[in-house]
Image (tube, helix red, strand yellow):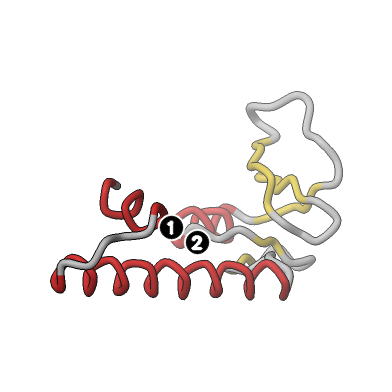
């Protein structure tokens, strides 16, 4: 039997098999071979109480917003550096570091 080691939010921490592993960390959930294979095939990171699995975004709203803002800042910096290079304007240190990447 397969076991999914999870945290308090049902985030998948690892897979165990009772035929192989003598010690299985808690908490864990029993899953069928089919549920385990589905999770592996689809790179699922959450295991529900019934053993079904899914992809789930565990980030907080603040983390999601911060990552979105970081992407916007990156795009803006890229556009600014590109425009300045085309027009011959000097780059800021941050823009110059971006160009060096």
Relative image position of residue 76 (x, y in whole percent): 39, 74
Q: Position of residue 3 (x, y in %)?
A: 71, 45
Q: Position of residue 7 (x, y in %)?
A: 80, 51
Q: Estimate how packed mark 1 is, as few (under 14), some (14 to 19) or many (20 or more) residues with alpha carbons within 10 Å.
A: few
Question: Is 86 placed left or right of 62 in the picture?
Answer: left
Left or right of 99, for residue 15:
right
Distance between the alpha carbons at the discs numbered 1 and 2: 5 Å
Q: Helix, strand or loop at disc 1?
A: helix
Q: Is residue 36 above or below residue 24?
A: below
Q: Quick check: 3 left or right of 41?
A: right
Q: Residues within 10 Å of mark 2 (few under 14, many from 20)?
A: some
Quarter location, residue 82: bottom left
Along the line of sight, the residue nearer the viewer: 83 or 35:
83
- For label 2, the residue is 38
* In contact (CB < 8 Å): disc 1 and disc 2: yes
Q: Position of residue 50 (x, y in %)?
A: 75, 68
Location of the N terminus by quadrant is: top right
Mark drawn on residue 41 = 1
Which type of secondary structure does the marked residue at label 2 adopt?
Answer: helix
Residue sitting at x 50%, y 61%: 38
Q: Is residue 25 placed above or below 48 in the rendered structure? A: above
Above or below residue 74? Residue 98 is above
């Amino acid at each position: 039997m397969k076991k999914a080691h999870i945290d308090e939010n049902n985030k998948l921490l690892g897979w165990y098999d009772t035929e192989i592993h003598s010690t299985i960390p808690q908490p864990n959930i029993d899953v069928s071979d089919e549920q385990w294979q589905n999770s592996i095939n689809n790179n699922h990171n959450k295991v529900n109480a019934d053993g079904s699995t899914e992809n789930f975004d565990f980030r907080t709203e603040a983390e999601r917003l911060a990552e979105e803002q970081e992407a916007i800042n990156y795009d803006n910096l890229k556009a600014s550096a590109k425009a300045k290079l085309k027009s011959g304007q000097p780059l800021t240190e941050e823009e110059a570091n971006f160009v060096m990447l």
